[in-house]
Amino acid sequence: MAETNSTAPAVPLTLAAALAPVATVLIWSGNVVVTEAASGVIAPGSIAFYRWLIAFLVLLPFVARAAWKHRAVAARHGLQLAILGALGMVVYQSLAYEAAKTTSAVNMGVMLALMPLMSALLASLFAAERLSFSRVAGGLVSLGGLLWLTSHGQPATLLTGGFHLGDGLMLIAIAANSLYGVLLRRWIIPLSMWLQLFWQIAAATLLLVPVWLMGTISPITMNNLPLILYAAIPTSLVAPLCWMTAIRQLGAARTALFINLLPVVVAVLAWAILKEQLHAYHAIGGGLALLGVGIGLRQRKSTELR
C-alpha cells in the first residue's frame, strides 16, 4: 500500500501559495480560447497526442540525466505514475472532447463546477483531508454562481435540455481529474515535481497513441502549429507543474476551488480577445463564483465536519 502524507498540514493561503493555482487557471483559460480556435483546424485526437508528445520531447533534454539516475525509483512507482498520467492527462481530456459531441457547452460548464465539491468529498474519503463547513459552503456558493453564469441568468433553462451521453462522459471525466488530485496528494513518490511530471507525460503519450491512430489524423501545418505549441508548452508543461505544486501545498480540495475562477477568466478573455459582449449575468455569476472560492479557502478548525 502506498504511503500517505495526509497528515501533513496544508500551507496557509498566502499570496505565494495562491500563485501556482492562479497561474494554472490563467493558462487553462487561455487554452479554452485556443481550443475554440482549433475547432475545425485539427482533430481532437491529433492535438491531444501532439501536445503531449511535444511536451515530452521539450522536457526530455532537461530531465534525461536525472530520469536515468532515478530510474529505479521511477520503476518502483511506475504503476502510480502511469495511473496519474492516465487520469490527469488522458481520461479527463479525451472524455471531455468526446462529451462535447453530444452535450452543450452550458452543461459542460455546469458540471465542471462540481469539481471542487467532488474533490472535497474524494479527498475526505481517500486522503483523510477534513471536510470543513467552509469548504462545502464555498463550493455550493460557487456552484450557484456558475449555474447563473452558464445559464445566462436563467437557471431554469438547464432543466429543459435533458441528460445526454456527453453529460455522463463529462461526469466521469471530472471524477477522473478530481481523483488525480487526491492520489497526487496521497501518494508519496520520492521524485522531484519535474521528474514526476516527465513520467506522467511519458505514460500519457503512450496511452494516446491508439487514440490518435484510431481517430482522424490531422497533419501539423502552419495554421495549427501555434495552437499545438500553446497546448504543448504552457498548457501541458507549465500548468500541470503549477497544479501539482498547488495540490502538494494546499491539498486537493482547496486547490480545486480555484477551478471556479476559470469561467470568470474565460469570460474576460473572450471579451478582450474574441470581442464577445459581457452582460449582467457575467458579473453576478462571476462575483458569486469568486465569493465561493474565498469562503472555501478559509481555514476554520471549529467548523470541521469530521
Image (cartoon, rainbow, N blue to C red):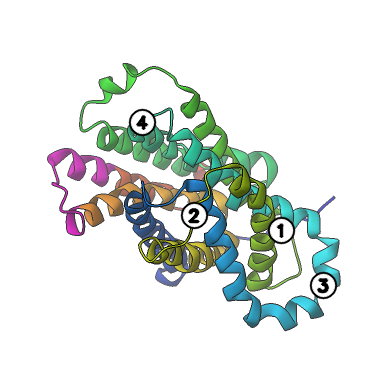
Residue 17 % position (x, y)? 47, 67
- Rounded to the nearest whole Å, what is the CA distance between mark 4 and mark 3? 44 Å
Labels 1 and 2: the sequence-earlier one: 1
Q: Amino acid at mark 4?
A: Ser
Q: Which residue is mark 4?
A: 104
- Rounded to the nearest whole Å, what is the CA distance between mark 2 and mark 3? 29 Å
**Along the line of sight, which residue is nearer the eye, 145 or 241?**
241
The structure residue drawn at horizontal position 18% and vertical position 38%, both measured from the top left corner, is: 281
Q: Which mark is residue 186?
A: none
Q: Which residue is mark 3?
A: 71
Q: Which residue is mark 1?
A: 5
Of badges 2 and 4, nearer the viewer stands 2
Task: For mark 4, give the secondary structure.
Answer: loop
Q: Is residue 143 above or below residue 25?
A: above
Horizontal side of residue 238 vs 150, given as left or right? right
Let me know if residue 183 appears in the view.
no
Residue 294 % position (x, y)? 36, 51
Residue 126 figure quarter: top right
Q: Do callouts 1 and 2 mark residues in contact (Cβ within 8 Å)?
A: no
The structure residue drawn at horizontal position 52% and vertical position 44%, both measured from the top left corner, is: 216
Q: Do callouts 4 and 3 mark residues in contact (Cβ within 8 Å)?
A: no
